[in-house]
């Protein structure tokens, strides 16, 4: 019984992973170019100066809330502070963290 349950959970997780991977193959509703302005505006509203950071990485991913562009900003100079993260959702809302 335990082995059957384990195999069933494994099969479910693999099928969910393939569904998520398939969904990420679709084009984002918010183009990357447009999301950059949203990310910089969110930084400013959070009290972070975009000029004090450089854009380290951008990833397109999803969560239960929906798909989003995930930005990682690193401080200039590198030893002057912590990384800041911005999630820009397809509806142009954004969350800033790591400050």
Image (spheres, rainbow, N blue to C red):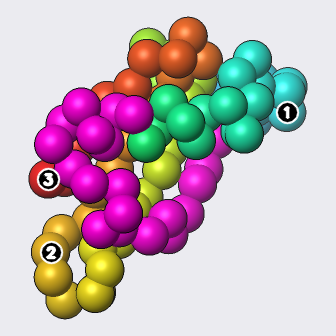
Of marks 3 and 1, the one in the foreground: 3
Indicate which disc, 2 or 3, sits on the residue closer to the N terminus.
2
Q: Quadrant of residue 42?
A: top left
CB-based contact (under 8 Å), mark 3 and mark 1: no
Q: Which mark is residue 82?
A: none
Mark 1 and mark 2 in contact (Cβ < 8 Å)? no
**Residue marked by disc 1:** 25
Mark 2 Cα-neighbour bin, 10 Å: few <14, some 14–19, many ≥20 = few
User: What span is colored magenta in the figure?
Assistant: 41-62
Say what secondary structure mark 2 lies in: loop
Q: Where residue 99 sits: x, y (%)?
A: 14, 53
- The answer to which of 62 and 14 lies nearer the viewer is 62
Which element is circle 1 on?
loop
* Label 1 Cα crowd, 10 Å radius (few <14 / some 14-19 / many 20+): few
Q: Residue at x 39, y 34 (%)?
A: 41
Tell me which label, 3 or 1, sits earlier in the chain.
1
Residue wearing tag 3: 99
Above or below, 39 against 5 in this view is below
Q: Residue at x 39, y 25 (%)?
A: 94
| Residue 78 image-quadrant placement | bottom left
Q: Is residue 52 left or right of residue 41?
A: left
Residue 86 counted in the magenta span: no
Q: Is residue 56 magenta?
A: yes
According to the picture, the residue beneath numbered tag 2 turns out to be 81
Q: Where does the image place residue 39, in percent across and percent down from the top left?
A: 46, 38
- Left or right relative to 45: residue 27: right
2 or 1: mark nearer the eye: 2
Viewer-closest of 46 and 56 = 46
The residues tagged by marks 3 and 1 sit, at their Cα atoms, a distance apart of 31 Å
């Amino acid at each position: 019984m335990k082995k059957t349950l384990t195999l069933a959970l494994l099969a479910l997780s693999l099928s969910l992973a393939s569904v998520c991977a398939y969904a990420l193959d679709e084009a984002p509703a918010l183009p990357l170019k447009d999301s950059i302005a949203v990310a910089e505006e969110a930084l400013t509203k959070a009290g972070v100066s975009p000029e004090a950071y450089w854009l380290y990485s951008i990833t397109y991913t999803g969560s239960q809330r929906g798909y989003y562009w995930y930005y990682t900003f690193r401080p200039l100079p590198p030893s002057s502070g912590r990384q800041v993260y911005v999630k820009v959702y397809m509806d142009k809302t954004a969350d800033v963290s790591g400050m």
